[in-house]
Image: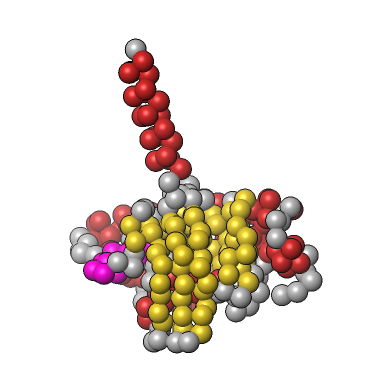
Amino acid sequence: MEKNGFYSMRTSALRKLKTTMSKIETKNLDLFYGSFHALLDINLEVEEKMITALIGPSGCGKSTLLRALNRMNDLIEGVRITGEVCVDGKNIYEHGTDLIGLRKKVGMVFQRPNPFPLSIFDNIAYGPRIHGIKNRGELEGIVQKALSDVMLWDVLKDKLDRFALNLSIEQQQRLCIARLSAITPEIVLMDEPCSALDPMATQRIEELMFELKKNYTIVIVTHNMQQAARVSDKTGFMLLGKLVEYGDTKQVFTTPHEKQTEEYITGRYG
């Protein structure tokens, strides 16, 4: 009986560990642009199917950290990185990492929507085609689901052959999120996705984020502290390349532990 009880407790502990394991974890992450030390000893844990916001003044390293999570900084000459970024426990900076597979799993939405100069259908089908899906019927199903995910299917289902660049800015941003959804990522990185949108369009994109987090882990960089407070579960405050404070959003905004966080949130600088 005692032995069975031990194994029961051990199994319960393992299950609890599995359900609370971080989706992303950075360990002593440092990043240099040439001689400039842009990220300093970043230790961050991002939980699965939550929205994590990164806030801080311009130039503090938010977007650099975001790009480090799917190795987009690799495209910049002179970048050097030490430490680890683990996705599902695996260090993505290990030699031999499949970058195409990584960026399929960890996708990114940029500040300004960047649809391809193609039809709406071909924008969304582009990624699945790259990954080997050629059957028209299968592609049509993927396009329908992706547009439904971003609440555009009813609006665009009869206009799939239209040029994507003719959509409104908000629709273009939704389309870019749908294009990402079509390759079934697990993590969505958003670099100020509402910076080019008006307040009403911003509200609709924020509502979309709540829907998306049912299926995706989301990390968002934003200069809009009100937005971070509205949409995120966790918030990290960055300053001069350091992660000054990280915790539950309500705690960070109402009872920050660090004086620098309080000064930024109350508008004393930044």
Q: Quadrant of the C terminus?
A: bottom right
- Residue sitting at 65 percent across and 61 percent down? 227
The front one of 76 and 27 is: 27
The front one of 191 and 205 is: 191
Magenta region: 95-106
The front one of 54 and 242 is: 242
The picture quadrant where one finds residue 185 is bottom left
Q: Position of residue 80 (x, y in %)?
A: 40, 79
- Residue sitting at 37 percent across and 19 percent down? 5
Q: Position of residue 208 (x, y in %)?
A: 54, 56
- Residue sitting at 30 percent across and 66 percent down? 94
Q: Can the viewer see residue 110?
A: no
Horizontal side of 110 relative to 228 (left or right) equals: left
Q: State yes or no: residue 104 in magenta.
A: yes
**Number of callouts:** 0
In the picture as drawn, the residue positioned furthest to the front comes out as 2
Q: Position of residue 192 (x, y in %)?
A: 57, 70
Q: Is residue 10 above or below residue 212?
A: above
Horizontal side of 259 relative to 86 (left or right) equals: right
The picture quadrant where one finds residue 128 is bottom left
Q: Can the viewer see residue 79?
A: yes
The front one of 54 and 212 is: 54
Horizontal side of 29 relative to 169 (left or right) equals: left
